[in-house]
Structures are given as structure tokens and as C-alpha cells.
Image (spheres, grey):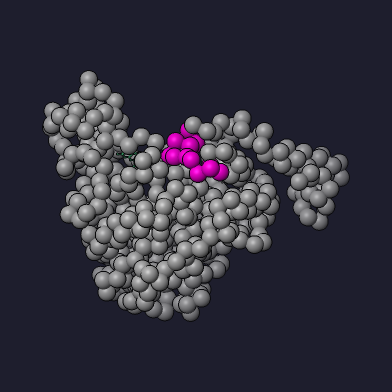
Amino acid sequence: MNKILVANRGEIALRIMKTAREMGIKTVAVYSEADATAPHVRYADEAVCIGPPASGESYLRMDKLLQVARDTNSDAIHPGYGFLSENPVFADEVKQAGLTFIGPNAHSMRTMGDKLSAKDAVGKYDIPLVPGSDGEVTDPAVGRAIANDIGYPVLIKASAGGGGKGMRIIYDDASFVEQMQLAINEAKSAFGNGAVFVEKFVEKPRHIEIQVLADGHGNVVHLFERECSIQRRHQKVIEEAPSAVLTPELRKTMGDAAVKVAKACDYIGAGTVEFLVDKHLNFYFLEMNTRLQVEHPVTELITGLDLVREQIRIARGETLGYGQNDIRMYGHAIEARVYAEDPRENFMPSTGTLQVYRLPNGPGVRVDDGFEEGMQVPIFYDPMLSKLIVYAQDREQAMDRMIRACQEYQIHGIQHTLPFVSYVMKHEAFRSGDFDTNFVKECFTPDNLDVLDDGLADDASVIVAHLLENQETSTNPTIPNEQTGLWKINRRR
Ligand code: MV4
């Protein structure tokens, strides 16, 4: 493999290119007109514009991506996450064009992309599933009987849904039939597939996922878990490894189950098996993500493996070269997704220019990002600015390190979620490890931020003072920076 086309943008495009470069492999960036000045474009050995800003006219255009791959003599395509990463048609077309798709085969994507076929595939193995219907339910009377059997509340899920889309919770028998009809109609219009199934609603679950790696020679291992329960509206905000609640025994049991899930769909590459874990630590298979995930760095930090390197090695046909017993985990890693969103305004997307953008650094701090000071944050894509990842000996030190890194990280010009991250790191429920997927809903209101993040008021006053000072001498206000010394003089922390 001599040249990889990276069919993505932002932090993940850069992340992939960095490993490719270490491996002596050339990279090709593709970019939309909105990303012409983006770091991933400059980092690549070659870069080709593939169209207007809208994803549908650029990053999602299979024909253009394949054309660029041919024109540049690329021999492989890495899809990153999102966009075309879990599209089986794209995986097949890449292969038909004589290129290597750095990811699983289309069969695995199809099996896991449909929730019913996923449950069907893993049901043949000894993997715990949430109690519910055995397959699709079309007759509301049948669904109602199942619901009464397993007990309310129940969830109706669309087979073609996922990531929280196409779910409907039902609390009582009286509303079941009507709700199920609505769920079917919704699934038909949203996904073009009306297939639904019934599951017991697991209340206050934790979301714990297992990273797996499978080579093309039948070797499958797991790389332990990531705890991803801190999320809002099905968007993860904080992920960590290991989970504060898994015992070594449960870790092994869930890891073994995840390996079986991978085998159930003939998986090849890096994948993630999602489980729900209830308050009694019962776990249930939920779905499998057939891509490299946003939160992969926490696994890299506790295992010492480079997941992109493993993906590339597997795609080249190499064997893993190690077994389950060779893989160890050390220390504790936490990732915070930094979004261009205002945590004080119900996480509304915030747009603008990164007028000040200074990274934290020092022991145990990693930032994966795709922005630089002075850049506009484009409105066309995901509002994630960066991933702030910390690593330390244990969970306590990792949380303290995250708080320190949040203080060092300077982002001005747009609203962002760093104050929220600090808040979570100081919260008793998070510190003790006693939290679930309802944490944000139950434990966070915007009022919390101002009390705990005393640095923000300082930041605001420094900026206002500086702008006022500047107005007297210039019509062109500058931004406070290290040269002015203002940060150091005025800040208490
Ligand atoms: C559930 C559940 C409770 N019981 N299934 C949400 C996304 C999709 N992957 C499945 N999801 C859930 N399925 C049963 N039977 C609760 C959720 C859920 C959730 C799961 C993982 C992470 C965050 C979540 C937030 C709300 C609901």
C-alpha cells in the first residue's frame, strides 16, 4: 500500500494521515470548497477539491471520490467515521474499482446496519440480548401480548434505526396498539422500512462498548471497554477507559461476548460492540458500529496500540501478530468532545471565528483537532471542534488532569463546551463513578456553569478591557494574546 485517499475531513482526516505518514504511506486529501484552507488539506501529500460545501455534493459523492482515487493513483481509501464509513455500497464500489477499502466488508456492514438482522446474527451465539420480540413484529396485537409478557415500560425500535433514531417508549397497555402503529408509520417514512421490534426498556442504563480488532485470518481480539454514558440527545460528550464499574471478571465476559459478535458477522478490521449495562451489571448487546469511532483514542492510550495502524495492517492482509493474552491495559484515559455549542443555551450550535485558539499540553494531554487560530468554524458539518484526551495513572488523576487541561485550553470567538466538561469532572456523581445515560438530563442546568467556572468571568473582563483600551487608539481591535501580557496580569488562576 503506497497511497491512501482519506475520504473525510477535520480531525479524523488528520489523525489518519499522521499514522499513514509514520508508516511511509503517501496521503491524498479531498476537500469541499468550505475546507480549502483546512489543516487536513495542507497536511496531505496531495489534495483535490471535490465540490461545494454541502456534504451531499462533496464528501458523500462516491463517484468523485473514486475518480480522485484513480487520478491520483491511490491504492486504498480510508473512510474515517460518519459520511460513507458504514455504507456497504461504497465499500463494494471501492473494491470493484480495484482499491483496498480500509474497513470491514459490505456483508458485515449490512448485517449490523439493520438491527433485526444484527440480533438475528448474534442470537445464534451465546450473547445476552434485551428481552423482547424474536424478530420483527407486524401485528400490534402480537406486540401487545409480548409487551404484557415482558412487562412495561417497553421500547419499540425501528430495525433500520440506530443511534437513538426510530425509538418509542411505551409505559402502559392502554396506549400500546396506537403507539406501535405510529412507530411503524414513522419508520416507513424515516427509513423506508417499516420493520419494528419490541424490547424491554432498560431504565437508567450505562452505555459501555468494547473495541474489537479482527484480521483476515480468523484472529479476533478485544481491546477492553469504553464507558460512554455521558451523552446528550444521543451525542456522546465524555468517554473514558476503563469503566469505573466493570470488574475484571465482567470485563472478560463482555470482551468475550464482543469477540463472538464480531465473529457472528465475519468481521474484519476495527469495530465496536455496544452494550447496555443495567444497575445490577447485567449487560445486553445493543448494536455494532462497523467503523473507527470518534472515541478510539482512549483505547489507544490504555493499550498503547495505534488503531489506525492496526486498521491499515489488517487491510494489507497482515495477521494481528498478538493474541488476547498479549494485550494489557494500563492507567486511565478520558476524552472530552469539544463542541462549538453554547452549554448555557441548551447546547445551541455556535458559529464564528476562532479568534483565540491555544492548545493545552504537558504530561498526559493529547488533542485531536482539525482547526487553527483564525479559522471560521464551517456551519455545514458536525460542530465538533476537537477531542481533548487525557491519560494518567488512575481515574482520579485523569479527572484532575482534564480539569487542568480545560483551564489551559483557550478558545475565544465562539461558544464551546469546555466549561461543561470542567463541570462534569467536578461533579460528585461523575467522580464517584455512579452515573448513567441520564446524567446530563438529571445533573446539569446552565446555572451550574457560572458558579463553578470562575475563570470565565475573568476571560470576559480581560477581553472587554482590552477591546475598550484598543478602541481609543485603533479602529482595528486586536485580540488579547501572550504578547500583551494581559492574560497573566489579570487572571486569578
Ligand atoms: C435502549 C435503551 C433502553 N432499553 N434499549 C439509544 C441509542 C440506541 N443505540 C439504543 N438506545 C437505547 N436503547 C432498551 N431496550 C436505552 C437507550 C438509550 C441510550 C443508549 C445508549 C446511550 C445513550 C442512551 C440514551 C438514551 C437511551
The residue segment tinted magenta is 430-441
Between 474 and 410, the one lying in front of the other is 410
Looking at this view, is 226 or 478 the one in front? 226
- Taking depth in this image into account, of 227 and 483 the one nearest to the observer is 227
Residue at screen point 66% across, 37% down = 452
Give x and y (percent) for residue 391: 57, 59
Instruction: Give me the residue at 58% from left, 51% from top.
Output: 396
Asked if residue 43 shows in the view, the reply is yes
Q: Position of residue 231 (x, y in %)?
A: 46, 42
Whether the magenta-drawn stretch holds residue 435 is answered as yes
Identify the image quadrant of residue 86. bottom left
Is residue 420 visible in the rendered structure shown here? no
Residue at position x 30%, y 64% in the image: 104
Does 33 sit above or below residue 451? below
| Rendered residue at 38%/69% (across/down) | 325
Give the image quarter of residue 444.
Answer: top right
Residue 188 image position (x, y, % from top left): 22, 38
Query: Where residue 268 sits in the image (x, y, percent)?
Result: 30, 66
Q: Quadrant of the N terminus?
A: bottom left
